[in-house]
Image: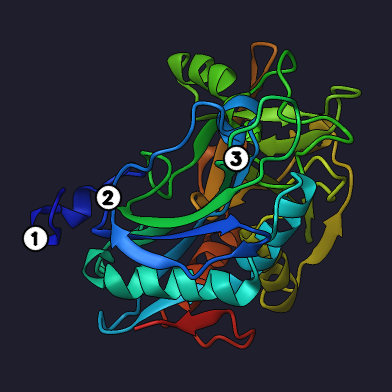
Amino acid sequence: MVTPSEIQWNELTFSLTPSKTMYVSVFSGNQWHPGVLQPYGNISISPAAGVLNYGQGVFEGLKAYHTKDNVGVVLFRPRDNARRMIESCERICMPAVPEEMFMEAVRNVVQSNKEYVPPYRPEATAQGSLYLRPMVCGTGAVLGVAPANEYTFIVFASPVGPYFKTGFQPIKLKVDPHYHRAAPGGTGGVKAIGNYAVGMYPAKKAKQQGFSEVLYLDAKEDKYIEEVGAANFFCIIGKSIITPDLNGSILSGITRRSVLQLAQDQLGLKVEERRLTLEEALKADEAFATGTAAVISPIGSMTFEDKTTIIKDGKVGPYTQKLYETLLGIQHGILPDPYNWIERVV
Protein backbone atom coordinates (compact mmCIF):
# COMPACT_ATOMS: atom_id res chain seq x y z
CA MET A 1 0.00 0.00 0.00
CA VAL A 2 1.23 3.48 -0.90
CA THR A 3 1.75 5.75 2.10
CA PRO A 4 0.75 9.44 1.94
CA SER A 5 4.41 10.49 2.06
CA GLU A 6 5.03 8.54 -1.16
CA ILE A 7 2.23 10.21 -3.14
CA GLN A 8 3.15 12.86 -5.72
CA TRP A 9 0.09 15.05 -5.22
CA ASN A 10 0.59 17.13 -8.35
CA GLU A 11 0.82 14.01 -10.52
CA LEU A 12 -2.40 12.31 -9.40
CA THR A 13 -4.72 11.00 -12.09
CA PHE A 14 -8.19 9.52 -11.74
CA SER A 15 -6.94 6.06 -10.84
CA LEU A 16 -6.88 3.80 -7.81
CA THR A 17 -4.45 4.54 -4.98
CA PRO A 18 -5.99 2.64 -2.05
CA SER A 19 -6.09 4.36 1.32
CA LYS A 20 -5.60 2.36 4.51
CA THR A 21 -9.13 1.52 5.69
CA MET A 22 -12.61 0.79 4.36
CA TYR A 23 -16.06 0.43 5.93
CA VAL A 24 -17.98 -2.85 5.66
CA SER A 25 -21.49 -3.82 6.75
CA VAL A 26 -23.54 -6.91 5.95
CA PHE A 27 -27.31 -7.25 5.50
CA SER A 28 -28.65 -10.60 6.66
CA GLY A 29 -31.61 -11.77 8.70
CA ASN A 30 -33.59 -8.84 7.29
CA GLN A 31 -31.37 -6.16 8.83
CA TRP A 32 -28.16 -4.21 8.33
CA HIS A 33 -25.59 -5.14 10.95
CA PRO A 34 -23.29 -2.51 12.51
CA GLY A 35 -20.52 -1.56 10.13
CA VAL A 36 -16.82 -1.71 10.97
CA LEU A 37 -13.65 -0.10 9.68
CA GLN A 38 -11.10 -2.63 8.52
CA PRO A 39 -7.88 -2.53 6.48
CA TYR A 40 -8.44 -1.99 2.77
CA GLY A 41 -8.29 -5.34 1.03
CA ASN A 42 -10.06 -8.10 -0.82
CA ILE A 43 -13.38 -9.55 0.26
CA SER A 44 -14.52 -13.16 -0.10
CA ILE A 45 -17.84 -13.99 -1.79
CA SER A 46 -19.51 -17.04 -3.31
CA PRO A 47 -19.10 -17.67 -7.05
CA ALA A 48 -22.92 -17.81 -7.04
CA ALA A 49 -23.19 -14.27 -5.58
CA GLY A 50 -26.01 -12.23 -7.07
CA VAL A 51 -23.68 -9.44 -8.07
CA LEU A 52 -21.41 -11.80 -10.04
CA ASN A 53 -24.16 -13.68 -11.83
CA TYR A 54 -26.89 -11.10 -12.30
CA GLY A 55 -25.22 -7.75 -11.73
CA GLN A 56 -27.21 -6.94 -8.60
CA GLY A 57 -25.25 -3.96 -7.38
CA VAL A 58 -25.20 -0.16 -7.22
CA PHE A 59 -22.62 2.43 -6.29
CA GLU A 60 -22.08 6.12 -5.57
CA GLY A 61 -19.21 8.52 -5.99
CA LEU A 62 -18.46 11.56 -3.86
CA LYS A 63 -15.41 13.54 -2.82
CA ALA A 64 -13.77 14.92 0.29
CA TYR A 65 -11.80 18.14 -0.13
CA HIS A 66 -9.27 20.10 1.84
CA THR A 67 -10.36 23.64 2.53
CA LYS A 68 -8.13 26.49 1.37
CA ASP A 69 -6.27 26.53 4.71
CA ASN A 70 -5.43 22.80 4.32
CA VAL A 71 -6.70 22.23 7.85
CA GLY A 72 -10.36 21.31 7.43
CA VAL A 73 -11.76 18.48 5.31
CA VAL A 74 -15.27 18.75 3.88
CA LEU A 75 -17.79 16.72 1.90
CA PHE A 76 -19.93 18.13 -0.91
CA ARG A 77 -23.68 17.32 -0.72
CA PRO A 78 -23.17 13.83 0.76
CA ARG A 79 -26.81 13.43 1.75
CA ASP A 80 -27.79 13.74 -1.90
CA ASN A 81 -25.61 10.71 -2.59
CA ALA A 82 -27.21 8.84 0.31
CA ARG A 83 -30.71 9.52 -1.01
CA ARG A 84 -29.79 8.61 -4.57
CA MET A 85 -28.32 5.33 -3.35
CA ILE A 86 -31.63 4.54 -1.64
CA GLU A 87 -33.41 5.06 -4.98
CA SER A 88 -30.85 2.93 -6.81
CA CYS A 89 -31.17 0.08 -4.28
CA GLU A 90 -34.94 0.06 -4.62
CA ARG A 91 -34.74 -0.13 -8.44
CA ILE A 92 -32.31 -3.09 -8.29
CA CYS A 93 -34.42 -4.85 -5.62
CA MET A 94 -31.94 -4.52 -2.77
CA PRO A 95 -32.37 -3.32 0.83
CA ALA A 96 -31.63 0.37 1.03
CA VAL A 97 -28.81 1.67 3.21
CA PRO A 98 -30.40 4.15 5.67
CA GLU A 99 -29.26 7.74 5.16
CA GLU A 100 -27.67 8.06 8.59
CA MET A 101 -25.81 4.78 8.19
CA PHE A 102 -24.47 6.00 4.84
CA MET A 103 -23.36 9.26 6.45
CA GLU A 104 -21.69 7.48 9.37
CA ALA A 105 -19.78 5.22 6.98
CA VAL A 106 -18.57 8.09 4.78
CA ARG A 107 -17.51 10.22 7.76
CA ASN A 108 -15.63 7.32 9.36
CA VAL A 109 -13.75 6.51 6.16
CA VAL A 110 -12.73 10.15 5.64
CA GLN A 111 -11.64 10.62 9.24
CA SER A 112 -9.67 7.36 9.19
CA ASN A 113 -7.94 8.28 5.93
CA LYS A 114 -7.63 12.05 6.31
CA GLU A 115 -3.91 12.01 5.50
CA TYR A 116 -4.85 10.76 2.01
CA VAL A 117 -6.87 13.89 1.20
CA PRO A 118 -4.80 15.82 -1.37
CA PRO A 119 -3.73 19.29 -0.21
CA TYR A 120 -5.35 22.37 -1.66
CA ARG A 121 -2.88 23.98 -4.06
CA PRO A 122 -3.73 27.60 -4.98
CA GLU A 123 -1.60 27.45 -8.12
CA ALA A 124 -3.32 24.35 -9.55
CA THR A 125 -6.04 24.65 -12.20
CA ALA A 126 -7.42 21.22 -11.25
CA GLN A 127 -7.53 20.29 -7.55
CA GLY A 128 -7.13 16.80 -6.13
CA SER A 129 -9.61 15.16 -3.77
CA LEU A 130 -10.27 11.98 -1.82
CA TYR A 131 -12.72 10.04 -3.95
CA LEU A 132 -15.18 7.92 -1.96
CA ARG A 133 -16.83 4.87 -3.46
CA PRO A 134 -19.87 3.58 -1.51
CA MET A 135 -21.35 0.42 -3.03
CA VAL A 136 -24.01 -2.17 -2.26
CA CYS A 137 -23.76 -5.64 -3.80
CA GLY A 138 -25.76 -8.83 -3.66
CA THR A 139 -23.19 -11.14 -2.07
CA GLY A 140 -25.56 -13.93 -1.11
CA ALA A 141 -25.53 -17.09 -3.27
CA VAL A 142 -28.40 -17.45 -5.75
CA LEU A 143 -28.89 -19.67 -8.80
CA GLY A 144 -32.24 -18.64 -10.26
CA VAL A 145 -32.82 -15.07 -11.40
CA ALA A 146 -33.95 -13.61 -8.09
CA PRO A 147 -32.72 -11.15 -5.45
CA ALA A 148 -29.90 -12.39 -3.25
CA ASN A 149 -30.56 -13.12 0.43
CA GLU A 150 -27.45 -11.30 1.68
CA TYR A 151 -25.89 -7.95 0.79
CA THR A 152 -22.68 -6.09 1.57
CA PHE A 153 -22.26 -2.33 1.90
CA ILE A 154 -18.69 -1.09 1.42
CA VAL A 155 -17.11 2.37 1.37
CA PHE A 156 -13.50 2.71 0.27
CA ALA A 157 -11.44 5.75 -0.70
CA SER A 158 -8.67 6.81 -3.06
CA PRO A 159 -6.89 10.12 -3.62
CA VAL A 160 -7.47 11.25 -7.21
CA GLY A 161 -6.59 13.97 -9.67
CA PRO A 162 -8.64 15.19 -12.68
CA TYR A 163 -10.92 12.73 -14.47
CA PHE A 164 -9.69 13.79 -17.91
CA LYS A 165 -5.93 13.86 -18.44
CA THR A 166 -6.16 17.39 -19.84
CA GLY A 167 -7.61 18.74 -16.59
CA PHE A 168 -9.77 21.83 -17.05
CA GLN A 169 -9.18 22.00 -20.80
CA PRO A 170 -11.67 21.49 -23.66
CA ILE A 171 -12.31 17.85 -24.47
CA LYS A 172 -13.11 16.21 -27.81
CA LEU A 173 -16.27 14.12 -28.06
CA LYS A 174 -17.32 11.51 -30.58
CA VAL A 175 -21.05 11.18 -31.24
CA ASP A 176 -21.59 7.48 -31.88
CA PRO A 177 -25.15 6.48 -32.87
CA HIS A 178 -24.18 2.80 -33.08
CA TYR A 179 -24.08 2.42 -29.29
CA HIS A 180 -26.43 3.48 -26.53
CA ARG A 181 -25.89 3.95 -22.83
CA ALA A 182 -29.45 3.25 -21.67
CA ALA A 183 -32.97 2.68 -22.96
CA PRO A 184 -36.42 3.90 -21.84
CA GLY A 185 -37.71 1.81 -18.95
CA GLY A 186 -34.24 0.54 -18.08
CA THR A 187 -31.84 1.50 -15.30
CA GLY A 188 -30.20 4.58 -16.83
CA GLY A 189 -31.68 6.82 -14.16
CA VAL A 190 -29.93 5.01 -11.28
CA LYS A 191 -26.28 4.13 -10.57
CA ALA A 192 -26.50 0.43 -11.34
CA ILE A 193 -23.16 -1.25 -11.95
CA GLY A 194 -24.30 -2.68 -15.28
CA ASN A 195 -24.82 0.78 -16.74
CA TYR A 196 -21.09 1.35 -16.98
CA ALA A 197 -19.84 -1.86 -18.57
CA VAL A 198 -21.81 -1.17 -21.78
CA GLY A 199 -19.88 2.06 -22.34
CA MET A 200 -16.40 0.59 -22.09
CA TYR A 201 -16.16 -0.69 -25.66
CA PRO A 202 -17.38 2.47 -27.45
CA ALA A 203 -15.23 4.61 -25.12
CA LYS A 204 -12.18 2.47 -25.89
CA LYS A 205 -12.77 2.86 -29.64
CA ALA A 206 -13.26 6.61 -29.30
CA LYS A 207 -10.08 7.08 -27.27
CA GLN A 208 -8.08 5.09 -29.82
CA GLN A 209 -9.25 7.66 -32.37
CA GLY A 210 -8.09 10.58 -30.25
CA PHE A 211 -11.36 11.50 -28.53
CA SER A 212 -11.85 12.02 -24.81
CA GLU A 213 -15.27 10.37 -24.54
CA VAL A 214 -18.47 9.36 -26.31
CA LEU A 215 -21.55 11.55 -26.53
CA TYR A 216 -24.56 9.23 -26.47
CA LEU A 217 -27.88 9.82 -28.22
CA ASP A 218 -31.26 8.44 -27.15
CA ALA A 219 -31.92 4.77 -27.91
CA LYS A 220 -35.34 5.36 -29.45
CA GLU A 221 -34.75 7.97 -32.17
CA ASP A 222 -30.97 8.58 -32.26
CA LYS A 223 -31.81 12.26 -32.23
CA TYR A 224 -31.69 13.60 -28.70
CA ILE A 225 -28.62 13.95 -26.49
CA GLU A 226 -28.44 11.77 -23.39
CA GLU A 227 -25.07 11.76 -21.60
CA VAL A 228 -21.31 12.12 -22.08
CA GLY A 229 -19.95 8.75 -20.98
CA ALA A 230 -20.55 8.90 -17.23
CA ALA A 231 -21.31 12.64 -17.13
CA ASN A 232 -24.28 14.93 -17.76
CA PHE A 233 -24.31 17.21 -20.82
CA PHE A 234 -24.89 20.98 -20.81
CA CYS A 235 -24.85 23.67 -23.45
CA ILE A 236 -25.33 27.41 -23.37
CA ILE A 237 -27.21 29.19 -26.14
CA GLY A 238 -27.54 32.91 -25.69
CA LYS A 239 -28.68 33.48 -22.11
CA SER A 240 -30.06 29.96 -21.61
CA ILE A 241 -28.36 26.94 -20.08
CA ILE A 242 -29.85 23.73 -21.43
CA THR A 243 -29.49 20.13 -20.25
CA PRO A 244 -31.46 16.99 -21.14
CA ASP A 245 -34.42 16.44 -18.84
CA LEU A 246 -34.51 13.48 -16.48
CA ASN A 247 -36.53 11.11 -18.61
CA GLY A 248 -35.67 7.91 -16.74
CA SER A 249 -32.61 6.99 -18.79
CA ILE A 250 -30.45 9.92 -17.61
CA LEU A 251 -28.79 9.98 -14.20
CA SER A 252 -29.79 12.76 -11.83
CA GLY A 253 -26.28 14.05 -11.28
CA ILE A 254 -25.50 15.91 -8.07
CA THR A 255 -23.05 18.19 -9.88
CA ARG A 256 -25.77 18.63 -12.51
CA ARG A 257 -28.30 20.00 -10.03
CA SER A 258 -25.60 22.17 -8.42
CA VAL A 259 -24.70 23.73 -11.77
CA LEU A 260 -28.35 24.44 -12.55
CA GLN A 261 -28.71 26.25 -9.21
CA LEU A 262 -25.54 28.28 -9.69
CA ALA A 263 -26.36 29.16 -13.30
CA GLN A 264 -29.71 30.56 -12.29
CA ASP A 265 -28.74 32.29 -9.03
CA GLN A 266 -25.20 33.48 -9.70
CA LEU A 267 -25.08 33.93 -13.47
CA GLY A 268 -28.68 34.91 -14.19
CA LEU A 269 -29.08 32.30 -16.92
CA LYS A 270 -32.44 30.86 -17.91
CA VAL A 271 -32.51 27.18 -16.96
CA GLU A 272 -34.03 24.75 -19.47
CA GLU A 273 -34.35 21.03 -18.69
CA ARG A 274 -35.76 19.52 -21.86
CA ARG A 275 -35.12 17.29 -24.81
CA LEU A 276 -32.11 18.60 -26.68
CA THR A 277 -31.36 17.58 -30.26
CA LEU A 278 -27.83 17.01 -31.46
CA GLU A 279 -28.47 19.52 -34.24
CA GLU A 280 -29.28 22.21 -31.68
CA ALA A 281 -26.33 21.35 -29.45
CA LEU A 282 -23.89 21.64 -32.35
CA LYS A 283 -24.89 25.31 -32.65
CA ALA A 284 -24.24 26.06 -28.96
CA ASP A 285 -22.14 28.99 -27.79
CA GLU A 286 -20.60 26.84 -25.05
CA ALA A 287 -20.86 23.20 -23.97
CA PHE A 288 -19.56 21.18 -21.04
CA ALA A 289 -19.99 17.92 -19.13
CA THR A 290 -20.54 17.57 -15.38
CA GLY A 291 -20.11 14.83 -12.80
CA THR A 292 -18.54 14.09 -9.44
CA ALA A 293 -15.48 12.66 -11.18
CA ALA A 294 -15.40 15.09 -14.11
CA VAL A 295 -16.52 18.15 -12.06
CA ILE A 296 -17.02 20.56 -15.00
CA SER A 297 -15.24 19.65 -18.23
CA PRO A 298 -15.49 22.13 -21.13
CA ILE A 299 -16.27 20.62 -24.53
CA GLY A 300 -14.12 21.90 -27.37
CA SER A 301 -15.50 19.84 -30.24
CA MET A 302 -18.08 17.24 -31.20
CA THR A 303 -17.57 14.89 -34.14
CA PHE A 304 -20.55 13.23 -35.83
CA GLU A 305 -20.31 11.16 -39.02
CA ASP A 306 -16.75 12.38 -39.66
CA LYS A 307 -17.78 16.04 -39.42
CA THR A 308 -16.24 17.97 -36.54
CA THR A 309 -17.94 21.00 -35.03
CA ILE A 310 -15.72 23.30 -32.96
CA ILE A 311 -17.39 24.87 -29.92
CA LYS A 312 -16.31 28.37 -28.79
CA ASP A 313 -13.22 28.22 -31.03
CA GLY A 314 -12.07 25.24 -28.99
CA LYS A 315 -11.63 27.42 -25.90
CA VAL A 316 -13.23 27.54 -22.46
CA GLY A 317 -16.29 29.77 -22.55
CA PRO A 318 -16.84 32.55 -19.96
CA TYR A 319 -19.95 30.97 -18.42
CA THR A 320 -18.25 27.57 -18.19
CA GLN A 321 -15.21 29.20 -16.55
CA LYS A 322 -17.35 31.08 -14.03
CA LEU A 323 -19.38 28.00 -13.10
CA TYR A 324 -16.21 25.98 -12.59
CA GLU A 325 -14.60 28.64 -10.41
CA THR A 326 -17.76 29.12 -8.36
CA LEU A 327 -18.31 25.41 -7.78
CA LEU A 328 -14.70 24.78 -6.73
CA GLY A 329 -14.74 27.94 -4.64
CA ILE A 330 -17.67 26.62 -2.62
CA GLN A 331 -16.19 23.14 -2.33
CA HIS A 332 -12.87 24.40 -0.96
CA GLY A 333 -14.31 27.07 1.33
CA ILE A 334 -13.01 29.98 -0.76
CA LEU A 335 -16.52 31.27 -1.49
CA PRO A 336 -19.58 31.41 0.80
CA ASP A 337 -21.93 28.40 0.78
CA PRO A 338 -25.46 29.86 0.76
CA TYR A 339 -26.98 26.46 -0.03
CA ASN A 340 -25.54 24.45 2.90
CA TRP A 341 -23.94 22.04 0.45
CA ILE A 342 -20.77 21.60 2.50
CA GLU A 343 -20.47 19.28 5.49
CA ARG A 344 -17.29 19.47 7.55
CA VAL A 345 -15.79 16.13 8.58
CA VAL A 346 -12.39 17.05 10.00
Q: Residue furthest front?
A: 29
Tell which tag, 2 or 3, sits nearer the viewer: 2
Q: Earlier in the sequence, mark 1 or mark 3?
A: 1
Q: Secondary structure at mark 1?
A: helix
Q: Amino acid at mark 2?
A: Pro
Where is residue 279 drawn, in percent x and y? Answer: 82, 30
Q: Amino acid at mark 3?
A: Ala
Where is residue 111 drawn, in percent x and y? Answer: 32, 76
Residue position marked by numbered label 2 in the rendering: 18
Q: Secondary structure at mark 3?
A: loop
Vertical arrangement, residue 88 with respect to residue 322, above or below: above
Tell which tag, 1 or 3, sits nearer the viewer: 1
Q: Nearer the viewer, residue 143 or 337?
A: 143
Q: Earlier in the sequence, mark 2 or mark 3?
A: 2
- Asked if the residues shown at circle 1 and circle 2 are in contact, with their CB atoms under 8 angstroms apart, the answer is no
Residue position marked by numbered label 1 in the rendering: 5
Q: Residue at x 73, y 13 (%)?
A: 178
In the rendered image, is residue 110 in sight?
yes
Left or right of 174 in this view: 44: left
- In space, the residues marked 2 and 3 are separated at their CA atoms by 22 Å
- Asked if the residues shown at circle 2 and circle 3 are in contact, with their CB atoms under 8 angstroms apart, the answer is no
Q: Residues within 10 Å of mark 3 (few under 14, many from 20)?
A: many
Tell which tag, 1 or 2, sits nearer the viewer: 2
Residue position marked by numbered label 3 in the rendering: 230
Q: Nearer the viewer, residue 205 or 36?
A: 36
Q: On residue 225, which mark appears? A: none
Left or right of 291 in this view: 54: right
Vertical arrangement, residue 27 with respect to residue 173, above or below: below
- In space, the residues marked 1 and 3 are separated at their CA atoms by 32 Å
